[in-house]
Image (cartoon, rainbow, N blue to C red):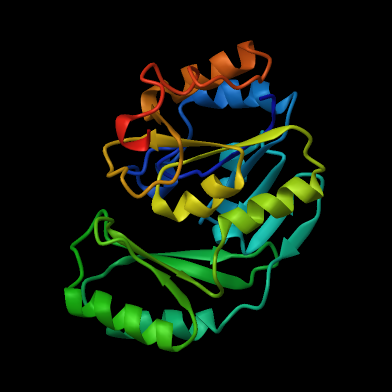
Amino acid sequence: MKIGAIFSDYDGTLAREDLQLEESKLPRPLEEILERIASSVPVCILTSKDLHFVQSRTSFATAWACVGGLEIVLARGEAIREGGIGNVKDALEFVKRIDTSGVAIELKRSVTGELLGFSIDWRYGPKPSQQFIQSVSTELTKRGLVVAHDGAQPFIDVFGATPNKGRALAKLKELLDIRGGTMFIGDSHDDNLAFDEADVGIGVKHGQALENLTCKYVVDFSELPGMLTRLAQNDMAFDAAIPSRKRELAWLA
């Protein structure tokens, strides 16, 4: 299958998750091969981050689906909002009122400055109480917001509407008039809708549990630049041997 576009998550996929926000960036070999590929086929970033954060770190991209796909921005200029947004500002004030541990909060804004969501992050500080996590999840869900929290991860994502990377991938494919197969690269169950929408799904391993991923192929984070280089050398023709020397994992067979 000839790959006509590459779509990719950002955190944990193209950039390490264990870096502080301001230090986050792509390893240079990965950035170089994506720049090379982007000169011949569209490369699009599908992320829970907002455009302000991700655009400068992935300047080679043709388009970005930000905040889980709630906003789509094309490098050629268009910005598209997907659906209505709940009252994220009041939700943020609620979280600040009940927080006693000093969690970090990352705001996720649209290109016009509208608050589309936020993350509550304790990777570099004390973990909040289970009561705090439960209270936030329960109250913000009652308010009609979408709360995403994997118990194994040290953060909570809050969205003003339902994120859907699969829908964003399909929309970008239409907007960019993608010809040929699509590849999506991700690392978590939040990426499953995009894995399912793409013709080829590649999971990136960095020590996380993989059982809940719906992708068919897996590659180590350190091997991702090499995998993409082999794909480019193969004139973007996908072969099952390209993602990993192990081909498909046994549990995916």
Q: Residue visible at 39% across and 16% down?
A: 245
Answer with the quarter of the image where residue 45 lies: top right
Tell me residue 87's x, y (percent): 55, 84
Tell me residue 19's x, y (percent): 34, 42
- In-image side of 23 versus 69 (left or right): left
Tell me residue 207's x, y (percent): 26, 37
Q: Is residue 16 above or below residue 224?
A: below
Question: Number of labelled discs?
Answer: 0
Q: Choose between 141 and 97: the one closer to the eye.
A: 141
* Residue 96 visible in rendering: no
Q: Choose between 145 and 174: the one closer to the eye.
A: 174
Tell me residue 215's x, y (percent): 46, 40
* Residue 112 visible in rendering: yes
- In-image side of 19 versus 167 (left or right): left
Q: Residue visible at 72% across and 34% down?
A: 42
Quarter of the picture containing the C terminus is: top left
Q: Residue visible at 68% across and 62% down?
A: 111
Q: Is residue 51 above or below residue 39?
A: below
Q: Is residue 32 above or below residue 82?
A: above
Quarter of the picture containing the N terminus is: top right
